[in-house]
Image (spheres, rainbow, N blue to C red):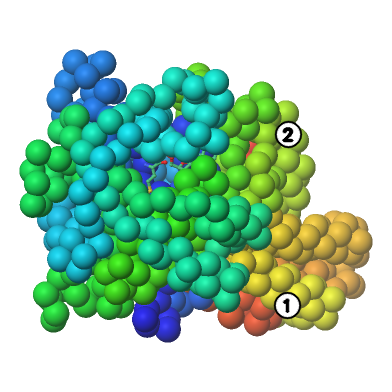
Amino acid sequence: MAAKNSFYLTTPIYYVNDAPHIGHAYTTVAGDVLTRWHRAKGEQVWFLTGTDEHGEKVMNAAEKNGVTPQAWCDRLVEEAWKPVWKDLNIANDDFIRTTEVRHESRVQRFLQGLKDAGHIYLAKYEGPYCIGCEEFKLPGDLEEGKCKVHGRPVETLSEENWFFKLSAFVPALIERYTKHPESCEPTSARNEVLSFLHGEVKDLSISRSTFNWGIPVPWDTEQVIYVWFDALLNYATAIGLGDEPGSEGAKKFEEFWPANVHLVGKDILRFHAVIWPAMLMAAGLPVPEKIFAHGWLLVGGEKMSKSKLTGIAPKDITDHFGVDAFRYYFLRAIPFGTDGSFSWEDMGARYTSELANDFGNLASRITAMIEKYSGGTVPAVAHDAGLAKALTDAVEVADKSMLALDFQGGIGAIMEFCKKVNGYVTEKEPWAIAKDESRTVELNEVLYNTIESVRALAVLLHPVMPATCEILWQSIGADTAIGAIADQRISGISTWGQLPEGSAVTKGAVLFPRLEEAK
Ligand code: MSP
Protein backbone atom coordinates (compact mmCIF):
# COMPACT_ATOMS: atom_id res chain seq x y z
CA MET A 1 0.00 0.00 0.00
CA ALA A 2 1.07 3.57 -0.63
CA ALA A 3 2.50 5.27 2.43
CA LYS A 4 -0.19 7.24 4.21
CA ASN A 5 1.15 10.65 3.42
CA SER A 6 1.81 10.06 -0.28
CA PHE A 7 -0.31 11.09 -3.22
CA TYR A 8 0.37 9.74 -6.70
CA LEU A 9 -1.61 11.18 -9.59
CA THR A 10 -1.32 10.50 -13.29
CA THR A 11 -2.70 11.98 -16.49
CA PRO A 12 -3.19 9.81 -19.54
CA ILE A 13 -0.10 9.69 -21.71
CA TYR A 14 -0.94 11.53 -24.91
CA TYR A 15 -0.58 10.29 -28.46
CA VAL A 16 2.07 12.22 -30.31
CA ASN A 17 0.33 12.06 -33.65
CA ASP A 18 -0.18 15.82 -33.31
CA ALA A 19 0.40 18.83 -31.05
CA PRO A 20 -1.66 19.32 -27.85
CA HIS A 21 -5.05 21.00 -27.94
CA ILE A 22 -7.11 22.40 -25.09
CA GLY A 23 -8.81 19.02 -24.48
CA HIS A 24 -5.43 17.56 -23.51
CA ALA A 25 -4.58 20.67 -21.53
CA TYR A 26 -7.85 20.33 -19.62
CA THR A 27 -6.78 16.97 -18.14
CA THR A 28 -3.22 18.06 -17.43
CA VAL A 29 -4.21 21.35 -15.78
CA ALA A 30 -6.74 19.51 -13.59
CA GLY A 31 -3.97 17.13 -12.52
CA ASP A 32 -1.63 20.02 -11.83
CA VAL A 33 -4.17 21.90 -9.72
CA LEU A 34 -5.04 18.81 -7.71
CA THR A 35 -1.42 17.84 -7.07
CA ARG A 36 -0.55 21.40 -6.08
CA TRP A 37 -3.46 21.29 -3.63
CA HIS A 38 -2.17 18.03 -2.14
CA ARG A 39 1.32 19.49 -1.90
CA ALA A 40 -0.20 22.38 0.01
CA LYS A 41 -1.59 19.79 2.41
CA GLY A 42 1.97 18.72 3.12
CA GLU A 43 1.70 15.37 1.36
CA GLN A 44 4.46 13.58 -0.50
CA VAL A 45 3.22 14.09 -4.06
CA TRP A 46 4.22 12.43 -7.32
CA PHE A 47 2.66 13.81 -10.49
CA LEU A 48 3.25 11.92 -13.73
CA THR A 49 2.43 12.80 -17.30
CA GLY A 50 3.98 11.73 -20.59
CA THR A 51 3.51 10.56 -24.15
CA ASP A 52 2.16 7.43 -25.82
CA GLU A 53 4.42 6.91 -28.79
CA HIS A 54 3.79 3.46 -30.26
CA GLY A 55 1.01 2.09 -32.45
CA GLU A 56 -0.32 2.63 -35.93
CA LYS A 57 -1.71 6.09 -35.35
CA VAL A 58 1.66 7.60 -34.45
CA MET A 59 3.45 5.48 -37.08
CA ASN A 60 1.08 6.76 -39.79
CA ALA A 61 1.56 10.38 -38.69
CA ALA A 62 5.34 9.94 -38.97
CA GLU A 63 5.02 8.34 -42.39
CA LYS A 64 2.84 11.17 -43.63
CA ASN A 65 5.52 13.60 -42.54
CA GLY A 66 8.28 11.58 -44.18
CA VAL A 67 10.28 10.83 -41.04
CA THR A 68 10.87 7.74 -38.88
CA PRO A 69 8.43 7.27 -36.00
CA GLN A 70 11.22 7.80 -33.47
CA ALA A 71 12.36 11.05 -35.11
CA TRP A 72 8.75 12.21 -35.29
CA CYS A 73 8.14 11.48 -31.61
CA ASP A 74 11.38 13.12 -30.52
CA ARG A 75 10.47 16.24 -32.44
CA LEU A 76 6.90 16.48 -31.22
CA VAL A 77 7.75 15.79 -27.61
CA GLU A 78 10.51 18.41 -27.51
CA GLU A 79 8.91 21.02 -29.74
CA ALA A 80 5.21 20.66 -28.98
CA TRP A 81 4.31 18.71 -25.84
CA LYS A 82 6.93 19.67 -23.27
CA PRO A 83 6.86 23.38 -24.18
CA VAL A 84 3.08 23.54 -23.83
CA TRP A 85 3.22 22.04 -20.33
CA LYS A 86 5.99 24.46 -19.42
CA ASP A 87 3.97 27.41 -20.72
CA LEU A 88 0.94 26.28 -18.70
CA ASN A 89 3.08 26.10 -15.56
CA ILE A 90 2.58 22.36 -15.10
CA ALA A 91 4.73 21.08 -12.22
CA ASN A 92 4.95 17.38 -13.11
CA ASP A 93 7.59 15.38 -11.24
CA ASP A 94 8.31 13.08 -14.16
CA PHE A 95 7.56 12.79 -17.86
CA ILE A 96 7.45 9.30 -19.28
CA ARG A 97 7.83 8.42 -22.94
CA THR A 98 6.87 4.90 -23.96
CA THR A 99 9.91 4.68 -26.25
CA GLU A 100 12.27 5.04 -23.30
CA VAL A 101 14.32 1.99 -22.33
CA ARG A 102 13.16 2.25 -18.70
CA HIS A 103 9.59 1.73 -19.93
CA GLU A 104 10.21 -0.87 -22.64
CA SER A 105 12.28 -3.18 -20.50
CA ARG A 106 9.80 -3.12 -17.61
CA VAL A 107 6.87 -3.74 -19.97
CA GLN A 108 8.61 -6.79 -21.42
CA ARG A 109 9.42 -8.15 -17.98
CA PHE A 110 5.81 -7.63 -16.86
CA LEU A 111 4.41 -9.39 -19.92
CA GLN A 112 6.79 -12.30 -19.54
CA GLY A 113 5.60 -12.62 -15.94
CA LEU A 114 1.97 -12.83 -17.05
CA LYS A 115 2.87 -15.42 -19.66
CA ASP A 116 4.78 -17.51 -17.13
CA ALA A 117 1.79 -17.35 -14.78
CA GLY A 118 -0.52 -18.69 -17.51
CA HIS A 119 -2.52 -15.54 -18.30
CA ILE A 120 -1.48 -15.33 -21.97
CA TYR A 121 -2.33 -17.62 -24.89
CA LEU A 122 -2.13 -17.67 -28.70
CA ALA A 123 -5.30 -17.40 -30.82
CA LYS A 124 -6.70 -15.86 -33.94
CA TYR A 125 -8.14 -12.36 -33.82
CA GLU A 126 -10.70 -11.46 -36.43
CA GLY A 127 -12.66 -8.26 -36.30
CA PRO A 128 -12.77 -4.50 -36.66
CA TYR A 129 -10.07 -2.15 -35.39
CA CYS A 130 -10.13 1.67 -35.21
CA ILE A 131 -6.70 3.24 -35.59
CA GLY A 132 -8.04 6.56 -34.24
CA CYS A 133 -8.95 4.85 -30.94
CA GLU A 134 -6.27 2.17 -31.29
CA GLU A 135 -9.02 -0.20 -30.21
CA PHE A 136 -10.48 -3.57 -31.14
CA LYS A 137 -14.13 -2.74 -31.68
CA LEU A 138 -17.37 -4.57 -30.98
CA PRO A 139 -20.21 -4.49 -33.49
CA GLY A 140 -22.13 -2.12 -31.17
CA ASP A 141 -19.25 0.40 -31.33
CA LEU A 142 -19.82 0.96 -35.06
CA GLU A 143 -22.30 2.89 -37.14
CA GLU A 144 -22.51 1.94 -40.80
CA GLY A 145 -19.07 0.35 -40.56
CA LYS A 146 -17.53 3.50 -39.09
CA CYS A 147 -16.13 4.14 -35.61
CA LYS A 148 -18.67 6.20 -33.66
CA VAL A 149 -15.92 8.28 -32.02
CA HIS A 150 -13.89 9.11 -35.11
CA GLY A 151 -16.52 8.79 -37.81
CA ARG A 152 -13.95 6.98 -39.94
CA PRO A 153 -14.03 3.49 -41.50
CA VAL A 154 -12.40 0.80 -39.37
CA GLU A 155 -9.79 -1.77 -40.49
CA THR A 156 -10.66 -5.45 -40.53
CA LEU A 157 -7.98 -7.48 -38.82
CA SER A 158 -7.33 -11.14 -39.17
CA GLU A 159 -4.20 -12.05 -37.25
CA GLU A 160 -2.69 -14.72 -35.08
CA ASN A 161 -2.18 -12.83 -31.81
CA TRP A 162 -1.33 -13.26 -28.17
CA PHE A 163 -4.36 -12.92 -25.91
CA PHE A 164 -4.71 -11.87 -22.29
CA LYS A 165 -7.34 -13.74 -20.25
CA LEU A 166 -9.26 -10.59 -19.44
CA SER A 167 -12.57 -12.39 -18.96
CA ALA A 168 -11.18 -14.28 -15.96
CA PHE A 169 -11.05 -11.04 -13.97
CA VAL A 170 -14.62 -9.91 -14.55
CA PRO A 171 -16.01 -11.22 -11.23
CA ALA A 172 -13.20 -9.55 -9.26
CA LEU A 173 -13.73 -6.26 -11.10
CA ILE A 174 -17.46 -6.31 -10.48
CA GLU A 175 -16.82 -6.95 -6.82
CA ARG A 176 -14.35 -4.08 -6.65
CA TYR A 177 -16.67 -1.49 -8.17
CA THR A 178 -19.62 -2.72 -6.17
CA LYS A 179 -17.83 -2.76 -2.82
CA HIS A 180 -15.72 0.34 -3.45
CA PRO A 181 -17.82 2.80 -5.41
CA GLU A 182 -15.22 5.51 -4.81
CA SER A 183 -12.74 3.61 -6.98
CA CYS A 184 -14.46 4.70 -10.18
CA GLU A 185 -16.05 8.14 -10.40
CA PRO A 186 -18.27 9.94 -11.20
CA THR A 187 -21.26 7.61 -10.68
CA SER A 188 -22.17 7.73 -14.38
CA ALA A 189 -18.71 6.36 -15.21
CA ARG A 190 -18.96 3.58 -12.65
CA ASN A 191 -22.38 2.58 -13.96
CA GLU A 192 -21.04 2.45 -17.48
CA VAL A 193 -18.17 0.22 -16.39
CA LEU A 194 -20.43 -2.08 -14.39
CA SER A 195 -22.86 -2.47 -17.26
CA PHE A 196 -19.95 -3.29 -19.57
CA LEU A 197 -18.69 -5.87 -17.07
CA HIS A 198 -22.13 -7.44 -16.82
CA GLY A 199 -22.15 -7.88 -20.60
CA GLU A 200 -20.06 -10.36 -22.55
CA VAL A 201 -16.42 -9.44 -21.88
CA LYS A 202 -14.01 -11.17 -24.23
CA ASP A 203 -10.32 -11.90 -23.80
CA LEU A 204 -8.06 -9.20 -25.22
CA SER A 205 -5.64 -9.43 -28.10
CA ILE A 206 -2.45 -7.87 -26.76
CA SER A 207 -0.15 -8.12 -29.74
CA ARG A 208 -0.07 -7.09 -33.41
CA SER A 209 1.86 -8.73 -36.22
CA THR A 210 1.26 -6.50 -39.24
CA PHE A 211 3.54 -3.58 -38.34
CA ASN A 212 6.57 -3.15 -36.13
CA TRP A 213 6.29 0.21 -34.36
CA GLY A 214 5.99 -1.10 -30.83
CA ILE A 215 7.70 -3.07 -28.10
CA PRO A 216 8.51 -6.63 -29.26
CA VAL A 217 6.74 -9.47 -27.48
CA PRO A 218 9.72 -10.92 -25.58
CA TRP A 219 9.17 -14.57 -26.60
CA ASP A 220 7.85 -13.84 -30.12
CA THR A 221 9.68 -10.90 -31.64
CA GLU A 222 7.65 -11.08 -34.88
CA GLN A 223 4.89 -9.39 -32.89
CA VAL A 224 4.72 -6.05 -31.10
CA ILE A 225 2.77 -5.46 -27.90
CA TYR A 226 -0.67 -3.86 -28.41
CA VAL A 227 -0.25 -0.13 -27.85
CA TRP A 228 -2.78 0.13 -25.01
CA PHE A 229 -1.24 -2.78 -23.10
CA ASP A 230 2.12 -1.02 -23.43
CA ALA A 231 0.70 2.43 -22.61
CA LEU A 232 -1.30 1.55 -19.50
CA LEU A 233 1.82 0.13 -17.92
CA ASN A 234 3.47 3.58 -17.97
CA TYR A 235 1.83 4.42 -14.66
CA ALA A 236 3.79 1.64 -13.02
CA THR A 237 6.96 1.48 -15.13
CA ALA A 238 7.65 5.16 -14.43
CA ILE A 239 7.97 4.43 -10.73
CA GLY A 240 10.01 1.24 -10.99
CA LEU A 241 7.59 -1.63 -11.63
CA GLY A 242 9.16 -5.01 -10.99
CA ASP A 243 12.61 -3.70 -10.04
CA GLU A 244 14.96 -5.66 -7.78
CA PRO A 245 13.98 -5.43 -4.11
CA GLY A 246 16.05 -2.76 -2.38
CA SER A 247 16.76 -0.83 -5.62
CA GLU A 248 15.81 2.82 -6.12
CA GLY A 249 12.96 1.77 -8.41
CA ALA A 250 11.59 -0.72 -5.91
CA LYS A 251 11.64 1.92 -3.17
CA LYS A 252 9.80 4.40 -5.32
CA PHE A 253 7.22 1.81 -6.27
CA GLU A 254 6.74 0.86 -2.66
CA GLU A 255 6.27 4.50 -1.74
CA PHE A 256 3.76 5.47 -4.43
CA TRP A 257 1.94 2.40 -5.71
CA PRO A 258 -1.04 2.03 -5.99
CA ALA A 259 -1.79 5.34 -7.69
CA ASN A 260 -4.30 7.47 -5.79
CA VAL A 261 -5.93 8.90 -8.91
CA HIS A 262 -5.73 8.13 -12.61
CA LEU A 263 -7.31 11.12 -14.35
CA VAL A 264 -8.79 10.18 -17.71
CA GLY A 265 -11.27 11.45 -20.26
CA LYS A 266 -14.49 9.45 -20.47
CA ASP A 267 -13.51 8.07 -23.89
CA ILE A 268 -10.70 6.04 -22.36
CA LEU A 269 -12.53 4.93 -19.23
CA ARG A 270 -12.90 1.25 -20.16
CA PHE A 271 -9.19 0.81 -20.77
CA HIS A 272 -8.47 2.20 -17.33
CA ALA A 273 -11.31 0.70 -15.32
CA VAL A 274 -11.38 -2.75 -16.91
CA ILE A 275 -8.18 -3.72 -18.74
CA TRP A 276 -5.68 -1.95 -16.47
CA PRO A 277 -6.87 -3.30 -13.10
CA ALA A 278 -7.23 -6.77 -14.65
CA MET A 279 -3.58 -6.61 -15.77
CA LEU A 280 -2.56 -5.65 -12.25
CA MET A 281 -4.69 -8.36 -10.66
CA ALA A 282 -3.10 -10.92 -12.96
CA ALA A 283 0.31 -9.80 -11.75
CA GLY A 284 -0.79 -9.87 -8.11
CA LEU A 285 -0.42 -6.12 -7.69
CA PRO A 286 -2.78 -3.68 -5.95
CA VAL A 287 -5.18 -1.81 -8.22
CA PRO A 288 -5.41 2.01 -8.37
CA GLU A 289 -7.48 3.69 -5.69
CA LYS A 290 -9.49 5.82 -8.06
CA ILE A 291 -10.15 6.23 -11.76
CA PHE A 292 -11.82 9.56 -12.39
CA ALA A 293 -13.34 10.15 -15.84
CA HIS A 294 -13.93 13.76 -16.81
CA GLY A 295 -16.13 14.95 -19.65
CA TRP A 296 -15.23 16.40 -23.02
CA LEU A 297 -14.69 19.94 -24.14
CA LEU A 298 -17.14 20.37 -26.95
CA VAL A 299 -16.97 22.61 -29.96
CA GLY A 300 -20.15 22.91 -31.96
CA GLY A 301 -21.70 20.19 -29.76
CA GLU A 302 -19.02 17.62 -30.64
CA LYS A 303 -15.87 16.44 -28.87
CA MET A 304 -13.21 18.89 -29.80
CA SER A 305 -10.48 17.11 -31.74
CA LYS A 306 -7.65 17.71 -34.13
CA SER A 307 -8.82 14.95 -36.45
CA LYS A 308 -12.13 16.77 -36.88
CA LEU A 309 -10.28 20.07 -37.27
CA THR A 310 -11.96 21.58 -34.23
CA GLY A 311 -8.82 21.49 -32.09
CA ILE A 312 -7.89 24.77 -30.42
CA ALA A 313 -4.29 25.16 -29.24
CA PRO A 314 -3.86 26.39 -25.65
CA LYS A 315 -1.79 29.28 -26.97
CA ASP A 316 -4.74 30.64 -28.95
CA ILE A 317 -6.42 31.22 -25.60
CA THR A 318 -3.48 32.08 -23.36
CA ASP A 319 -2.26 34.76 -25.79
CA HIS A 320 -5.51 36.56 -25.17
CA PHE A 321 -6.43 35.73 -21.57
CA GLY A 322 -3.12 34.74 -19.99
CA VAL A 323 -2.06 31.37 -18.59
CA ASP A 324 -3.67 31.66 -15.18
CA ALA A 325 -7.08 32.61 -16.56
CA PHE A 326 -6.85 29.53 -18.80
CA ARG A 327 -6.06 27.31 -15.80
CA TYR A 328 -8.91 28.88 -13.86
CA TYR A 329 -11.62 29.00 -16.48
CA PHE A 330 -12.18 25.38 -17.48
CA LEU A 331 -12.16 24.04 -13.94
CA ARG A 332 -14.39 26.83 -12.70
CA ALA A 333 -16.89 26.79 -15.54
CA ILE A 334 -17.42 23.07 -16.20
CA PRO A 335 -18.44 20.57 -13.50
CA PHE A 336 -15.62 18.00 -13.54
CA GLY A 337 -17.16 14.82 -14.92
CA THR A 338 -19.59 16.40 -17.40
CA ASP A 339 -19.12 17.75 -20.91
CA GLY A 340 -18.82 21.48 -21.41
CA SER A 341 -18.81 23.79 -24.37
CA PHE A 342 -16.02 26.25 -24.80
CA SER A 343 -16.95 29.74 -25.89
CA TRP A 344 -14.88 32.89 -26.09
CA GLU A 345 -17.84 34.94 -24.85
CA ASP A 346 -18.32 32.90 -21.69
CA MET A 347 -14.63 32.92 -20.96
CA GLY A 348 -14.48 36.69 -21.55
CA ALA A 349 -17.42 37.24 -19.21
CA ARG A 350 -15.95 35.18 -16.37
CA TYR A 351 -12.54 36.73 -16.85
CA THR A 352 -13.97 40.18 -16.43
CA SER A 353 -16.39 39.54 -13.61
CA GLU A 354 -14.53 37.02 -11.46
CA LEU A 355 -10.86 37.56 -12.18
CA ALA A 356 -10.49 41.20 -13.17
CA ASN A 357 -13.33 42.68 -11.08
CA ASP A 358 -13.66 40.45 -8.02
CA PHE A 359 -10.12 39.21 -7.43
CA GLY A 360 -7.83 41.56 -9.37
CA ASN A 361 -9.58 44.73 -8.25
CA LEU A 362 -9.63 43.68 -4.62
CA ALA A 363 -5.87 43.16 -4.74
CA SER A 364 -5.15 46.45 -6.44
CA ARG A 365 -7.57 48.41 -4.25
CA ILE A 366 -6.09 47.20 -0.98
CA THR A 367 -2.46 47.56 -2.01
CA ALA A 368 -3.17 51.07 -3.32
CA MET A 369 -5.01 52.03 -0.12
CA ILE A 370 -2.19 50.76 2.08
CA GLU A 371 0.28 52.80 0.07
CA LYS A 372 -1.92 55.83 0.30
CA TYR A 373 -3.24 55.69 3.85
CA SER A 374 -0.67 53.64 5.69
CA GLY A 375 2.66 54.60 4.13
CA GLY A 376 3.00 51.29 2.31
CA THR A 377 3.19 49.14 5.43
CA VAL A 378 0.66 46.77 6.98
CA PRO A 379 -1.05 48.42 9.96
CA ALA A 380 -1.49 46.79 13.39
CA VAL A 381 -3.04 43.33 13.45
CA ALA A 382 -6.83 43.52 13.73
CA HIS A 383 -9.63 40.99 13.68
CA ASP A 384 -13.05 40.82 12.06
CA ALA A 385 -15.18 37.97 13.30
CA GLY A 386 -17.38 37.88 10.20
CA LEU A 387 -14.46 37.66 7.77
CA ALA A 388 -12.57 35.19 9.92
CA LYS A 389 -15.60 32.90 10.10
CA ALA A 390 -16.27 33.21 6.36
CA LEU A 391 -12.64 32.28 5.73
CA THR A 392 -12.77 29.22 7.97
CA ASP A 393 -15.91 28.05 6.19
CA ALA A 394 -14.45 28.71 2.73
CA VAL A 395 -11.28 26.75 3.50
CA GLU A 396 -13.32 23.84 4.78
CA VAL A 397 -15.59 23.67 1.75
CA ALA A 398 -12.74 24.28 -0.69
CA ASP A 399 -10.63 21.51 0.84
CA LYS A 400 -13.45 18.99 0.86
CA SER A 401 -14.41 19.85 -2.71
CA MET A 402 -10.88 19.77 -4.12
CA LEU A 403 -10.17 16.40 -2.51
CA ALA A 404 -13.37 15.10 -4.13
CA LEU A 405 -12.23 16.51 -7.51
CA ASP A 406 -15.08 18.97 -7.45
CA PHE A 407 -12.98 21.83 -8.78
CA GLN A 408 -15.98 23.95 -9.58
CA GLY A 409 -17.26 23.71 -6.00
CA GLY A 410 -13.79 24.31 -4.54
CA ILE A 411 -12.98 27.35 -6.62
CA GLY A 412 -16.56 28.55 -6.15
CA ALA A 413 -16.17 28.56 -2.35
CA ILE A 414 -12.95 30.55 -2.62
CA MET A 415 -14.51 33.10 -4.97
CA GLU A 416 -17.49 33.46 -2.65
CA PHE A 417 -15.08 34.45 0.08
CA CYS A 418 -13.47 36.93 -2.32
CA LYS A 419 -16.89 38.48 -2.96
CA LYS A 420 -17.48 38.68 0.77
CA VAL A 421 -14.23 40.61 1.25
CA ASN A 422 -15.20 42.99 -1.55
CA GLY A 423 -18.54 43.48 0.17
CA TYR A 424 -16.73 44.26 3.42
CA VAL A 425 -14.61 46.95 1.77
CA THR A 426 -17.60 48.48 0.02
CA GLU A 427 -19.58 48.53 3.24
CA LYS A 428 -16.78 49.98 5.40
CA GLU A 429 -15.81 52.65 2.85
CA PRO A 430 -12.21 53.12 4.03
CA TRP A 431 -11.79 56.04 1.58
CA ALA A 432 -14.52 57.89 3.52
CA ILE A 433 -13.09 56.97 6.94
CA ALA A 434 -9.71 58.27 5.78
CA LYS A 435 -11.12 61.77 5.47
CA ASP A 436 -11.66 61.89 9.24
CA GLU A 437 -8.39 61.95 11.20
CA SER A 438 -10.09 60.88 14.42
CA ARG A 439 -10.96 57.52 12.83
CA THR A 440 -7.40 56.29 12.07
CA VAL A 441 -7.73 53.22 14.29
CA GLU A 442 -10.90 52.22 12.49
CA LEU A 443 -9.28 52.84 9.11
CA ASN A 444 -6.28 50.69 10.01
CA GLU A 445 -8.56 47.89 11.13
CA VAL A 446 -10.36 47.85 7.81
CA LEU A 447 -7.08 47.91 5.93
CA TYR A 448 -5.67 45.08 8.01
CA ASN A 449 -8.72 42.86 7.75
CA THR A 450 -8.76 43.31 4.02
CA ILE A 451 -5.10 42.62 3.37
CA GLU A 452 -5.18 39.64 5.72
CA SER A 453 -8.08 38.25 3.69
CA VAL A 454 -6.05 38.79 0.53
CA ARG A 455 -3.18 36.87 2.14
CA ALA A 456 -5.54 33.91 2.55
CA LEU A 457 -6.91 34.25 -0.99
CA ALA A 458 -3.41 34.16 -2.46
CA VAL A 459 -2.71 30.83 -0.77
CA LEU A 460 -6.10 29.36 -1.62
CA LEU A 461 -5.86 30.26 -5.29
CA HIS A 462 -2.17 29.40 -5.63
CA PRO A 463 -2.77 25.82 -6.89
CA VAL A 464 -5.09 27.18 -9.58
CA MET A 465 -3.20 30.33 -10.56
CA PRO A 466 0.38 29.92 -9.30
CA ALA A 467 2.08 32.76 -11.15
CA THR A 468 -0.54 35.40 -10.31
CA CYS A 469 -0.71 34.41 -6.66
CA GLU A 470 3.07 34.48 -6.38
CA ILE A 471 3.08 38.07 -7.68
CA LEU A 472 0.35 39.00 -5.24
CA TRP A 473 2.18 37.28 -2.39
CA GLN A 474 5.28 39.37 -3.13
CA SER A 475 3.32 42.57 -3.42
CA ILE A 476 1.72 42.20 0.02
CA GLY A 477 5.15 41.57 1.54
CA ALA A 478 4.19 38.07 2.65
CA ASP A 479 7.25 36.44 1.12
CA THR A 480 9.57 38.26 3.51
CA ALA A 481 7.18 38.35 6.46
CA ILE A 482 5.72 34.83 6.35
CA GLY A 483 7.81 32.73 3.94
CA ALA A 484 7.45 31.24 0.46
CA ILE A 485 3.89 30.82 -0.79
CA ALA A 486 4.62 27.22 -1.78
CA ASP A 487 5.38 26.45 1.88
CA GLN A 488 1.95 27.59 3.11
CA ARG A 489 -0.35 24.81 4.24
CA ILE A 490 -4.08 24.46 3.68
CA SER A 491 -4.53 23.61 7.36
CA GLY A 492 -2.98 26.94 8.37
CA ILE A 493 -4.78 29.29 6.00
CA SER A 494 -7.64 30.24 8.26
CA THR A 495 -5.43 31.10 11.23
CA TRP A 496 -6.12 34.82 11.41
CA GLY A 497 -3.50 37.49 11.90
CA GLN A 498 -0.53 36.03 10.04
CA LEU A 499 0.54 39.08 8.09
CA PRO A 500 2.55 41.03 10.67
CA GLU A 501 2.37 44.75 11.25
CA GLY A 502 4.99 46.63 9.28
CA SER A 503 5.21 44.32 6.24
CA ALA A 504 6.07 46.29 3.13
CA VAL A 505 3.23 46.47 0.61
CA THR A 506 3.74 47.63 -2.94
CA LYS A 507 1.09 48.23 -5.52
CA GLY A 508 2.24 45.68 -8.07
CA ALA A 509 1.28 45.13 -11.68
CA VAL A 510 -2.42 44.74 -12.55
CA LEU A 511 -3.12 41.02 -12.06
CA PHE A 512 -5.79 40.71 -14.74
CA PRO A 513 -5.57 43.51 -17.29
CA ARG A 514 -8.74 44.59 -19.03
CA LEU A 515 -9.18 42.44 -22.08
CA GLU A 516 -8.59 45.10 -24.70
CA GLU A 517 -5.26 45.82 -22.98
CA ALA A 518 -4.36 42.15 -22.49
CA LYS A 519 -1.33 40.59 -24.14
N1 MSP B 1 -2.80 7.62 -25.61
C1 MSP B 1 -4.11 7.42 -25.08
C2 MSP B 1 -4.08 7.39 -23.57
C3 MSP B 1 -3.21 6.33 -22.98
S1 MSP B 1 -3.20 6.40 -21.25
C4 MSP B 1 -2.43 5.00 -20.78
C5 MSP B 1 -5.00 8.58 -25.53
N2 MSP B 1 -4.40 9.68 -25.91
S2 MSP B 1 -5.13 10.99 -26.47
O1 MSP B 1 -4.08 11.90 -26.74
O2 MSP B 1 -5.98 10.64 -27.56
O3 MSP B 1 -6.09 11.51 -25.37
C6 MSP B 1 -5.62 11.73 -24.10
C7 MSP B 1 -6.62 12.41 -23.21
O4 MSP B 1 -7.07 13.63 -23.76
C8 MSP B 1 -7.85 11.57 -22.95
O5 MSP B 1 -8.12 11.57 -21.56
C9 MSP B 1 -8.94 12.31 -23.66
O6 MSP B 1 -10.16 12.17 -23.03
C10 MSP B 1 -8.43 13.72 -23.57
N3 MSP B 1 -9.10 14.53 -24.57
C11 MSP B 1 -8.91 14.51 -25.91
N4 MSP B 1 -9.85 15.35 -26.48
C12 MSP B 1 -10.63 15.88 -25.50
C13 MSP B 1 -11.63 16.85 -25.46
N5 MSP B 1 -12.13 17.39 -26.53
N6 MSP B 1 -12.10 17.22 -24.23
C14 MSP B 1 -11.56 16.73 -23.07
N7 MSP B 1 -10.60 15.84 -23.08
C15 MSP B 1 -10.22 15.27 -24.28
O7 MSP B 1 -6.21 8.42 -25.52
The circle drawn on residue 290 is none
Of mark 2 and mark 1, the one earlier in the sequence is: 2
Q: Quadrant of residue 438?
A: bottom right
Residue 49, placed above or below residue 210:
below
Classed neighbour count for the residue bearing mark 2: other residues with Cα under 10 Å, few (<14), some (14–19), many (≥20): few
Residue 38 point in image, percent of width and height: 49, 70
Residue 12 lies left or right of residue 444; in this view the side is left
According to the picture, the residue beneath numbered tag 2 turns out to be: 346
Residue 244 lies left or right of residue 237; in this view the side is left
Quadrant in which the N terminus is drawn = bottom left
Q: Residue at x 47, y 46 (%)?
A: 268
According to the picture, the residue beneath numbered tag 1 turns out to be: 392
Alpha carbon separation for disc pair 2 and 1: 30 Å
The kind of residue tagged 2 is Asp
Residue 311 point in image, percent of width and height: 51, 26
Quadrant in which the C terminus is drawn = top right
Along the line of sight, the residue nearer the viewer: 378 or 162: 162
Is there a contact, CB below 8 Å, between mark 2 and mark 1?
no
Q: Residue at x 55, y 53 (%)?
A: 199
Task: Identify the secondary structure beneath mark 2.
Answer: helix
Q: Residue at x 27, y 78 (%)?
A: 254
The kind of residue tagged 1 is Thr
